[in-house]
Amino acid sequence: MKLYDNKHAPNPRRVRIFLAEKGIDIPTVQVNIMEKECQTPAFTARNVMQRLPVLEFEDGTCLSESVAICRYFEVLHPEPPLMGRGAREMAEVEMWNRRMELDLFWRVTFAFRHTNPAMAELQVPQVPAWGKANGDYLEHALTWLDGELAERAFIAGESFTIADITAICAVGFMRVIGRKIGDDTPNLQRWHEAMAARPSFTA
Amino acid sequence: MKLYDNKHAPNPRRVRIFLAEKGIDIPTVQVNIMEKECQTPAFTARNVMQRLPVLEFEDGTCLSESVAICRYFEVLHPEPPLMGRGAREMAEVEMWNRRMELDLFWRVTFAFRHTNPAMAELQVPQVPAWGKANGDYLEHALTWLDGELAERAFIAGESFTIADITAICAVGFMRVIGRKIGDDTPNLQRWHEAMAARPSFTA
């Protein structure tokens, strides 16, 4: 089993942190996104959507989409639970993970892909106004999330989950649009310091 | 328990079809999106993201995000399984559901929200070039999906899952951008006829 990975991209990092939190070690193969290695015939056979990460099984079959790969390991290795336990908790984690995707992670990604000249060949067409709209929304999202974190330690409640992982990777990827968490969002800052102290943060 | 719903919107329909396939009947409350009923203080207290659908429990607490609501019922009512059974199958369904979201459902939604004048007050800012880019991508996505369906009956494999539901709702919502599945995608057409024959289709 191996994980097709890229050390600079935010989605593969989600899986790496998830595996580190589970204590699972899987060999990785680095794929150069900027050199269009996701678009080769060999890679396309692994994931028709030409995206990272991809998990390749011993028999050569493959699984893609970050959360799908996480789901696979969550079922096989339920401890510690990172996607909730029981119907209501699993649903709450799913809700928070999706909020972190739709309202944070994708915002950063769109802002980057649609405004950075280096992405012009990979993001066709680039729509700068869409990039700007997402960058603007992000300010609102960070303020909102700061308020949410005023009274709890983790994104989805009182324990670390995949929703924290998605948020960690979104916040980390803010570097590519020149933003970082500031003093104006102290709860988010406190949360982020706690996340950065976890060994999985550097996975 | 009740479901805050809108009969014209594609996301609440995902939950209604899911519940119909499970044989679960829950009272619904219609919320008028165009009249900004999702933005009232009362609704915002139910879902801070001001989106539909929302499931309200007997104690007044709420759960939002379509797939999170589906997850709740999948765990409590596992038969028939709509999110896969076992690690690999659950992961495959998750992968296909996400592909249907990212590469089909969101494309239709973005094309609609960013090009239709009626959405100008709700989608701020509207970015017409982003709407057009998504409409263009959709052509490619439908052709690709037609090829995927050449050799299997359902989106994620040999049984009906939440990935079919997401695709049904995406295809149905194509009406708002004046598109429908044509003779040039016969496998998709065959799949869609089979979906439309299920009682849940009109949920």
Image: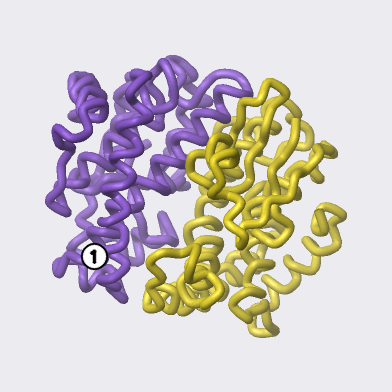
Chain colours: A purple, B yellow
Vertical placement of B29 versus A42: above or below? above
> Percent position (x, y) of residue A163?
40, 32
Q: For the residue labelled by badge 1, is the local secondary structure a helix, a strand or a loop?
A: loop
Q: Which residue is located at x 18 percent, y 23 percent?
A: A193
Quadrant of the rendered image containing residue A118: bottom left
The answer to which of B183 and A58 lies nearer the viewer is B183
Neighbourhood count class around disc 1 (C-alpha, 10 Å): few under 14, some 14–19, many 20 upward: few
Quadrant for the N terminus of chain B, please. Answer: top right
Q: Is residue A200 visible?
A: no
> Percent position (x, y) of residue B106?
50, 61
Q: Is residue B117 visible?
A: yes
Which kind of residue does numbered mark 1 sit on?
Lys
Vertical placement of A20 versus A35: above or below? above
Q: Which residue is located at x 25 percent, y 30 percent?
A: A188
The answer to which of A41 and A153 lies nearer the viewer is A153
Q: Which residue is located at x 53 percent, y 56 percent?
A: B101
Instruction: Answer with left or right where residue A106 lies relative to residue A180.
Output: right
Q: Which residue is located at x 28 percent, y 42 percent?
A: A170
> Percent position (x, y) of residue A75?
53, 26
The answer to which of A53 and B66 lies nearer the viewer is B66
> Percent position (x, y) of residue A79?
45, 15
Vertical placement of B106 versus B54: above or below? below
Which residue is identified by label 1?
A36
Instruction: Answer with left or right where residue B193 lies relative to residue B98.
Output: right
Instruction: Answer with left or right where residue B116 lies relative to residue B29.
Output: left
Q: How many marks?
A: 1
The answer to which of A136 and B150 lies nearer the viewer is A136
Vertical placement of B66 versus A187: above or below? below
Label 1 marks a residue whose chain is A
